[in-house]
Image: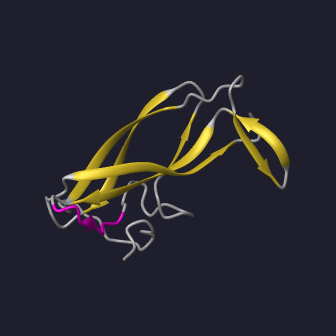
Amino acid sequence: MDPLNNAIPFMITKGTPVFILEVTIRNDYTPQTPLWRNDSGGNYSCSDVWFCLRAVLTDENGSVLHVPAVTPPYPQMPFGVPQFFQKSGTTQIYNLYFLVNTRNVSHYQIYVSYLSGNKAD
C-alpha cells in the first residue's frame, strides 16, 4: 500500500493501536499578505485556508511504515487524508491518527499536501 494514498477504509474500534501526532499550525495569511489563487474563476486572494496534512512515519532503521491515516472523522473525503480549515491569524493544534501494528515509530515528516483558500475572503 502506498503510504501517501491511504484512502482504503479500516475498522477502528476501542483498543485499536494508533499512533497520534500532535501538530501546531499557525496561519500567517492575512488580507494584507494573502494566499493568491489563480483558477478558472480568475485571480483572487484568501487569508482563511483549507489544507490537508500528511505524514511519513519511519522506524529506527529508516524504513517507511506503510500505515493508513485514520484521523477522525474517518474516512476523510474526498482526498483520503485529514482536511482542516483555519482562520487567518490563528494558531491551532491538530491531532493526526495513524493505524499502526508496531511501536517502533522513531521518526516522522509532516507536510501540507493541499492548500486552498475561500473565494469569499
The residue positioned 20% from the left and 63% from the top of the image is 16
Residue 47 appears left or right of 107: right
Residue 24 visible in the picture = yes
Q: Quadrant of residue 8?
A: bottom left
State yes or no: residue 24 in magenta: no
The residue positioned 19% from the left and 60% from the top of the image is 59
**Residue 29 position within the rendered picture, expressed as x and y whole percent measured from the top left:** 62, 30
User: Could you tell me what secondary structure mostly forms the magenta stretch?
Assistant: loop
Q: Is residue 88 above or below residue 119?
A: above
Q: Which residues are magenta?
A: 61-68
Q: Is residue 91 above or below residue 17?
A: above
Q: Is residue 95 above or below residue 67?
A: above
**Residue 76 position within the rendered picture, expressed as x and y whole percent measured from the top left:** 48, 60
**Residue 9 position within the rendered picture, expressed as x and y whole percent measured from the top left:** 40, 72
Quadrant holding the N terminus:
bottom left
Residue 120 visible in the picture = no
The residue positioned 56% from the left and 24% from the top of the image is 89
Residue found at the very far front of the displayed protein: 61
